[in-house]
Image (cartoon, grey):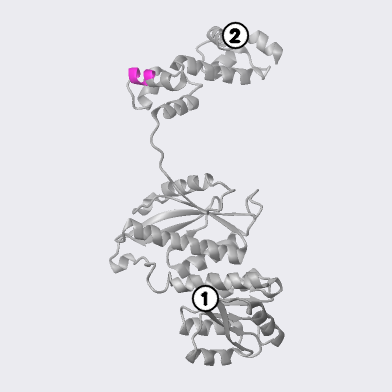
């Protein structure tokens, strides 16, 4: 049973909130107060799970009440029920320790009960307060740290385009959250994705670190979605120990986020290193250097294979010899160049890596079954 106390100086508001909770079998309103100081006196002898409070009240204000409660009862949940539809109010409340922020005019039984249950679950696990999630020790304390990068992205509820969220405001909000978790540092470059450098005690096992990270990521998601009404996507790099690796690990996390399926309910995607594919590397090399004079020896060497081994594997993969494959790719380039009537055949041959115009014409006819003149007429 979740035991709660309601603090609101408006009688109708207190009654309305209590009425919304009357049918909840797992939530019990222990007491209601119209004065924050009376509530503090009550809590000295009667601890509860969650405090529901307004912000603006006669006498002691809601923000001051939150500060007092957090200083005395660190693991008590706090849910703000306010009339202010203002992100700055919510951010300030979270900064001083509130766990949730709901607007009174949007309240209904389902939403209010759901929020209370979320906070209760979070607090009952005490993930950041009782040591079940181990905070990483600083280097000054003689502990070695291990890191991972988390690239964070926000998406609209429609999931059709990237959110137009205020980056500066979002950055401040994330900094406050991470400070409370004690688990990482936010970086918000002028260009590119915001990212978090998460840190852990390296002495923990891989399983313990993974469990801690999953818990932190889940809380990050819950807090952002609840307060900012934004969907979060987090692409995560592999672990690393040297801070010089941050740029490379950032690329890993970014690539992981790029592959995230927007239709999925998941929010985490971990980078997975794909096994080296020699033939794919060869085809990528060919694509990048197609306009140059390519040699079999150079391509095989770039793929870390001998020429005989490369030729055998390449034919098995593509069904073509290397010469056939390269010529087909070059002919595709020629077709694109032919659309530009200002280019001569000699210029096209030079731009597509053929040794001369005549050789290009012969290869084009062999690959397409048509002459360049006929192809241009059809175009």
Q: Position of residue 191 (x, y in %)?
A: 55, 51
Which residue is tagged 2? 369
Can residue 172 be seen here? The reply is no
Which residue lies at the image location 40% right of the left edge and 62% below the top edge? 212
Residue situated in front as seen by the camera: 266 or 291: 266
Picture quadrant where residue 56 is located:
bottom right
Q: Main secondary structure of the magenta part?
A: helix
Picture quadrant where residue 170 is located:
bottom right
Is 275 on the left-hand or right-hand side of 231?
A: left
The magenta region covers 307-312
Residue 229 sits above or below residue 239 on the image: below
Is 47 on the left-hand or right-hand side of 371?
A: left
Which residue is tagged 1? 97
As measured in the structure, the alpha-carbon distance from the residue carrying label 2 to the one carrying label 1 is 74 Å
Residue 141 sits above or below residue 54 on the image: above
Which label is found at residue 33?
none
Q: Neighbour class for label 1 at 10 Å: few (<14), some, many (≥20)?
A: many
Residue situated in front as seen by the camera: 98 or 184: 98
The verdict on residue 39 being magenta is no
Q: Position of residue 225 (x, y in %)?
A: 58, 62
Q: Position of residue 236 (x, y in %)?
A: 45, 52
Q: Earlier in the sequence, mark 2 or mark 1?
A: 1
Is 198 on the left-hand or right-hand side of 34?
A: left
């Amino acid at each position: 049973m979740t035991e709660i106390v309601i603090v609101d100086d408006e009688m109708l508001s207190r009654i309305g909130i209590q009425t919304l909770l009357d049918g909840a079998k797992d939530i019990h309103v222990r007491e209601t107060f119209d004065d924050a100081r009376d509530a503090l006196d009550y809590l000295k002898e009667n601890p509860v799970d969650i405090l529901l409070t307004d912000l603006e009240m006669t006498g002691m204000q809601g923000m001051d009440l939150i500060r007092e409660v957090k200083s005395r009862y660190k693991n008590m949940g706090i849910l703000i029920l306010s009339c202010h539809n203002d992100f700055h109010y919510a951010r300030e409340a979270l900064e001083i320790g509130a766990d949730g922020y709901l607007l009174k005019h949007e309240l209904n039984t389902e939403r209010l009960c759901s929020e209370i249950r979320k906070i209760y679950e979070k607090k009952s696990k005490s993930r950041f307060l009782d040591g079940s999630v181990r905070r990483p020790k600083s280097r000054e304390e003689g502990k070695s740290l291990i890191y991972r990068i988390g690239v964070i992205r926000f998406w609209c509820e429609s999931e059709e385009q990237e959110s137009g969220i205020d980056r500066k405001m979002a950055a401040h909000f994330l900094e406050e959250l991470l400070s409370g978790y004690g688990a990482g540092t936010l970086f918000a470059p002028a260009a590119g994705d915001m990212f978090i450098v998460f840190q852990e005690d390296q002495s923990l096992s891989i399983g313990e670190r993974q469990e801690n990270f999953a818990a932190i990521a889940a809380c990050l998601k819950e807090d952002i979605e609840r307060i900012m009404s934004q969907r979060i996507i987090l692409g995560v790099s592999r672990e690393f120990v040297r801070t010089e690796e941050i740029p490379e690990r950032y690329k890993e996390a970014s690539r992981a986020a790029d592959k995230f399926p927007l239709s999925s309910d998941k929010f985490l995607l971990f980078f997975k290193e794909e096994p080296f594919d020699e033939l794919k590397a060869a085809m990528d090399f060919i694509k990048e250097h197609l306009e140059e004079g390519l040699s079999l020896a150079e391509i095989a060497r770039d793929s870390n294979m001998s020429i005989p081994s490369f030729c055998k594997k390449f034919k098995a993969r593509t069904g073509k010899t290397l010469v056939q494959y390269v010529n087909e790719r070059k002919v595709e380039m020629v077709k694109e160049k032919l659309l530009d009537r200002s280019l001569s055949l000699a210029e096209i041959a030079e731009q597509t890596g053929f040794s001369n115009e005549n050789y290009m014409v012969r290869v084009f006819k062999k690959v397409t079954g048509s002459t360049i003149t006929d192809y241009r007429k059809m175009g």
